Image (cartoon, rainbow, N blue to C red):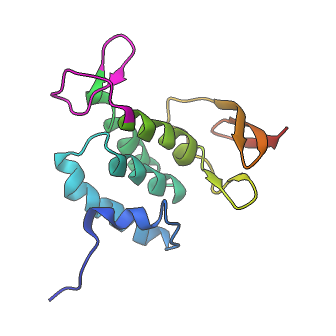
Amino acid sequence: MPGPTFGTVEPLIFFPIGFSAPSDVVSNDLQNVLSTKLHHGPGVRMSATLYSFAAAAIGHRDLYDMLYGSRYVPFRRGTFNILAESPQDPSTYFLTGAGGLLQQVLLGYCSLRLSSNAIELTYKPMLPREVTEVSVLGLYARGRTYDLVETPARASLKPH
């Protein structure tokens, strides 16, 4: 009998918990999630948005692009692309889904993490293919203000 498994939450031990594992282990866990739960949903819900963080951290470009883009496109509504809770739901505004998107930008493809003293870049940032630059100016964390500018070729996080 196989041992217990964490199933769809297993990739979450890499982020936000911060467990360290070889890239192939993280990739296998993400592929397992994709073959089960994500095939049927859950859309923009929080756990699905966190999977892309693990893909970015191990530099798995194709997996990251699939996890990032496909989780939002079917859920956009109206002129401003406001998120709904499901592809069938005509109502908006799905606040926690939007929060998940914001976390994907800052923590996922910008690779920002809070440390005990500051905010820092933790791995080579991975911007979505269609994004040429991300600038977050006046980011306040741990009593300091930072400016973040990233392109596919470089990342700069400067305290004021």
Q: Main secondary structure of the magenta part?
A: loop
The residue lying toward the viewer, choosing from 129 and 111, is 111
Q: Is residue 68 visible?
A: yes
Q: Residue furthest front?
A: 143
Q: Is residue 154 visible?
A: no
Rendered residue at 38%/38% (across/down): 96
Q: Position of residue 99 (x, y in %)?
A: 44, 37
Q: Position of residue 108 (x, y in %)?
A: 52, 47
The image quarter containing residue 65 is top left
Rendered residue at 75%/41% (across/down): 156
Magenta-highlighted residues = 77-95
Residue 94 located within the stretch drawn in magenta: yes
The residue lying toward the viewer, choosing from 133 and 72, is 72
Q: Residue furthest bottom?
A: 1
Question: How many numbered marks, from 0 up?
Answer: 0
Looking at the rendered image, the quarter that the N terminus falls into is bottom left
Q: Can you say whether 44 is above or below 132 in the image?
A: below
The residue lying toward the viewer, choosing from 129 and 76, is 76
